[in-house]
């Protein structure tokens, strides 16, 4: 295996040398605004509520490698708030549930720049990227609101679903309310991303990226003990989803 790795590494190096093309490393920052959602809500035995999309900013640092000034491999670290807001009307009451999930995300993506991208070519170019990420839950908070007033987890569900198994929910929660909002959710999630955008150079080596970026979580957000059937006796995994506009400012070394 080591021999194969050495051979591939040497082959890639010789290929770049033969093409007389310089590779670049780049670093920078990114800021975004995403609409977020949780697909397939888990309402713990009660009926499904209406979805309301929420929007949150996101910030991150990026580092990457660009070969041919065309093929980019990029990683970094990002702070991202995901979640969902739900509302419903039943039993002459109004219900609102707001889930906020704060993640530290490590992304990894491949980006291809379209058009002529020879070294020292600073023209505005379109690009697309595809990638994945792993995310670590830093903070989670769920707000339960009944008729405009914040209530406990148990009071919310006993009012929304009086015939539900409230005793079981109270046992799972360890009391009348959850001591830690993270108890509901898995601590690690992973997913895929896709983007389409444009890159333009502001000065020699300094590039501005504007893109439409979306992501979808592949893991079930719900902690195992909270994977409860809904009011129709069906359980479906809950998944993170987000999409919006991202602006990045990256500096290329050796361009």
Image: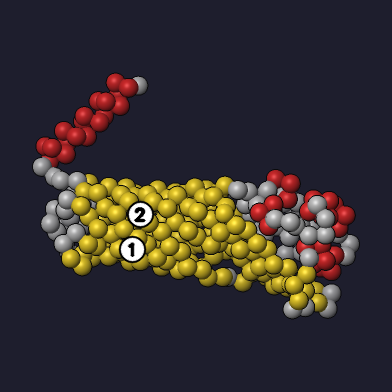
Q: Which mark is residue 248?
A: 1
Residue at x-position 17% and y-position 50%: 254
Judged from this view, the residue extending furthest toward the front is: 179
Q: Decide which of tag 2 and tag 1 comes sooner along the chain.
A: 2
On the image, which quarter does residue 140 sit in? bottom right
Coordinates of residue 56 in the picture (x, y in percent): 51, 68
Residue 142 lies left or right of residue 24; in this view the side is: right
Q: Which one is nearer the viewer's eye here, 41 or 23?
A: 23
Label 2 element class: strand
Disc 2 residue crowd, few under 14, some 14–19, many 20+, Cα 10 Å: many
User: Can the viewer see residue 106 in this picture?
Assistant: yes
Coordinates of residue 126 in the picture (x, y in percent): 27, 62
Disc 1 residue crowd, few under 14, some 14–19, many 20+, Cα 10 Å: some
Q: Which mark is residue 162?
A: none
Residue at x-position 25% and y-position 25%: 7
Q: Residue 62 carries which label?
A: 2
Residue at x-position 62% and y-position 52%: 221
């Amino acid at each position: 295996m080591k021999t194969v790795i050495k051979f591939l590494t040497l082959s890639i190096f010789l290929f770049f040398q033969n093409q007389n093309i310089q590779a670049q490393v780049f670093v920078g920052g990114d800021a975004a605004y995403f609409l977020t959602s949780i697909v397939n809500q888990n309402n713990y035995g009660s009926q499904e509520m209406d979805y309301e999309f929420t929007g949150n900013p996101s910030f991150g640092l990026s580092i990457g490698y660009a070969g041919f000034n065309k093929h980019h491999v990029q990683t970094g670290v990002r702070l991202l708030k995901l979640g969902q807001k739900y509302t419903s009307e039943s039993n002459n009451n109004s219900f609102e549930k707001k889930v906020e999930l704060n993640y530290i995300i490590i992304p990894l993506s491949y980006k291809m720049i379209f058009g002529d991208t020879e070294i020292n070519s600073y023209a505005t170019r379109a690009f697309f990227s595809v990638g994945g990420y792993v995310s670590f839950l830093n903070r989670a908070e769920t707000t339960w609101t009944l008729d405009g007033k914040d209530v406990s987890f148990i009071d919310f569900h006993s009012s929304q679903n009086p015939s539900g198994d409230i005793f079981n929910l109270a046992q799972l929660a360890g009391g009348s309310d959850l001591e830690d909002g993270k108890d509901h959710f898995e601590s690690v999630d992973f997913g895929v991303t896709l983007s389409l955008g444009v890159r333009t150079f502001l000065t020699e080596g300094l590039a501005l990226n504007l893109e439409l970026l979306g992501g979808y979580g592949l893991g079930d957000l719900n902690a195992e003990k909270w994977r409860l059937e809904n009011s129709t006796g069906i359980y479906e995994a809950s998944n993170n989803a987000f999409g919006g506009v991202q602006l990045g400012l990256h500096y290329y070394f050796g361009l």
